[in-house]
């Protein structure tokens, strides 16, 4: 009787072990794990969580674009990621500077779209809103290589959309080759 009990307990534990180790394709994934790796080699990647959901550019023409240019005595940076859903609605997130030079290793407040500021924009179809003093965030530049035209970093911000809803952009990362 004792051997039978040991056999039953061992068999039950073995079955539970195999069930715990099995790959379940239906198991929910952590959204952060679905974002692109945080690299600094010009991989042309961009991703974040938009209200807790994964946002990665795709669909339509020019889903991802990056420029960093010196124009009329000031530096202008613009990185935009566009995504179209199955109904062809376009969501765009962008990070920009207005006559503001960026430096590697620095963190910038995302404020209003004004001269000398860094700012972010949220667009849905033709409607766009910008960060502000009350709804701001940060942009951190982890790599800026002017020779090889690579810029990488992290971002996070809050923004009020055109309908008055608070949109939360978190865990943002990018690794881009830019046009000068």
Image: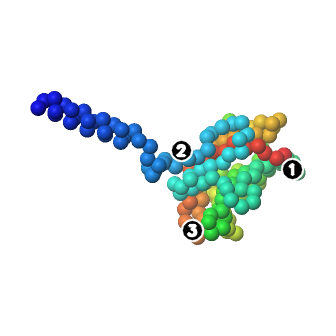
Residue depicted at x 31% and y 40%: 16
**Going by the picture, which residue comes out furthest to the top?**
3
**Residue 140 position within the rendered picture, expressed as x and y whole percent measured from the top left:** 65, 42
Residue closer to the observer: 11 or 164: 11
Residue at 70%, 69% (x, y): give it: 126
At mark 1, the secondary structure is strand
Marks 1/2: CA–CA distance: 38 Å
Instruction: Name the one closer to the observer, 61 or 125.
Output: 61
Q: Earlier in the sequence, mark 2 or mark 3?
A: 2
Q: Are marks 3 and 1 in contact (CB under 8 Å)?
A: no
Is residue 79 shown to the viewer in this render? yes
Q: Which residue is mark 2?
A: 33
Q: Which residue is mark 3?
A: 164
Instruction: From the image, tell me which residue sits under label 1.
Output: 71
Residue 108 visible in the picture = no
Mark sitting earlier along the chain (3/1): 1
Foreground of the two, 120 or 26? 26
Mark 2, secondary structure of its residue: helix
Marks 1 & 2, CB-CB < 8 Å contact: no
167 or 72: nearer the viewer? 167
Q: CA distance from mark 2 to mark 3?
A: 30 Å
């Amino acid at each position: 009787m004792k051997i039978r009990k040991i056999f039953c307990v061992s068999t039950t534990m073995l079955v539970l072990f195999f069930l715990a180790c099995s790959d379940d394709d239906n198991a929910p994934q952590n959204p952060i794990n679905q974002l692109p790796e945080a690299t600094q080699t010009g991989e042309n990647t961009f991703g974040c969580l938009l209200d807790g959901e994964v946002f990665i550019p795709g669909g339509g023409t020019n889903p991802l674009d990056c420029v960093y240019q010196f124009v009329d005595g000031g530096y202008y940076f613009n990185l935009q990621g566009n995504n179209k859903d199955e109904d062809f609605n376009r969501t765009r997130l962008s990070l920009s500077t207005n006559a503001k030079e960026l430096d590697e290793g620095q963190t910038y407040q995302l404020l209003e779209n004004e001269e000398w500021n860094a700012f972010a924009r949220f667009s849905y179809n033709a409607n766009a809103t910008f960060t502000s003093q009350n709804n701001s965030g940060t942009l951190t530049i982890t790599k800026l290589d002017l020779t090889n035209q690579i810029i990488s970093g992290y971002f996070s911000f809050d923004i009020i959309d055109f309908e008055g809803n608070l949109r939360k952009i978190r865990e943002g990362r990018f690794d881009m080759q830019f046009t000068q």
